Amino acid sequence: MAKKIGIGRATYAKTEQGVREPRRGELLAIAAITGVDSHWLETGEVPEAGEN
């Protein structure tokens, strides 16, 4: 995953562990790769119908 979004493995691990906040571009890349809604990744809130 780290390679796919263009960051190092250690950096990605810190993101997964909650040690560092991912940059917006990283979040968008993770959303695109995994098919998860970017709004949910950024906020933890389920988007309303019609968003994104």
Image (cartoon, rainbow, N blue to C red):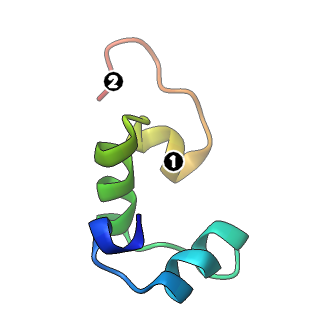
Q: Which mark is residue 51?
A: 2
What secondary structure is marked by label 2? loop
- Residue 37 image position (x, y, % from top left): 41, 35
Above or below residue 5? Residue 33 is: above
Residue displayed at 55% across by 87% down: 10
Q: Earlier in the sequence, mark 1 or mark 2?
A: 1
For this orientation, the residue located farthest to the top is: 49
- Residue 6 image position (x, y, % from top left): 28, 77
- Residue 13 image position (x, y, % from top left): 60, 77
Q: Amino acid at mark 1?
A: Leu
- Left or right: 4 in relation to 1: left
Q: Nearer the viewer, residue 26 or 34?
A: 34
- Packing grade of label 1 (10 A; few <14, some 14-19, many >=20) is some
To which quarter of the image does residue 28 belong?
A: bottom left
Residue displayed at 43% across by 36% down: 36
How far apart in space, not on screen, are marks 1 and 2 (Cα)? 14 Å
To which quarter of the image does residue 35 belong?
A: top left
Residue displayed at 71% across by 72% down: 17
Residue displayed at 33% across by 23% down: 51
To which quarter of the image does residue 2 belong?
A: bottom left
Q: Which mark is residue 14?
A: none
Q: Which residue is mark 1?
A: 41
- Packing grade of label 2 (10 A; few <14, some 14-19, many >=20) is few
Give the position of the C terminus as an image quadrant.
top left
Q: Amino acid at mark 2?
A: Glu
Above or below residue 52? Residue 38 is: below
- Residue 29 image position (x, y, % from top left): 30, 57
Q: Nearer the viewer, residue 50 or 16?
A: 16
Above or below residue 30? Residue 15 is: below
Give the position of the N terminus as an image quadrant.
bottom left
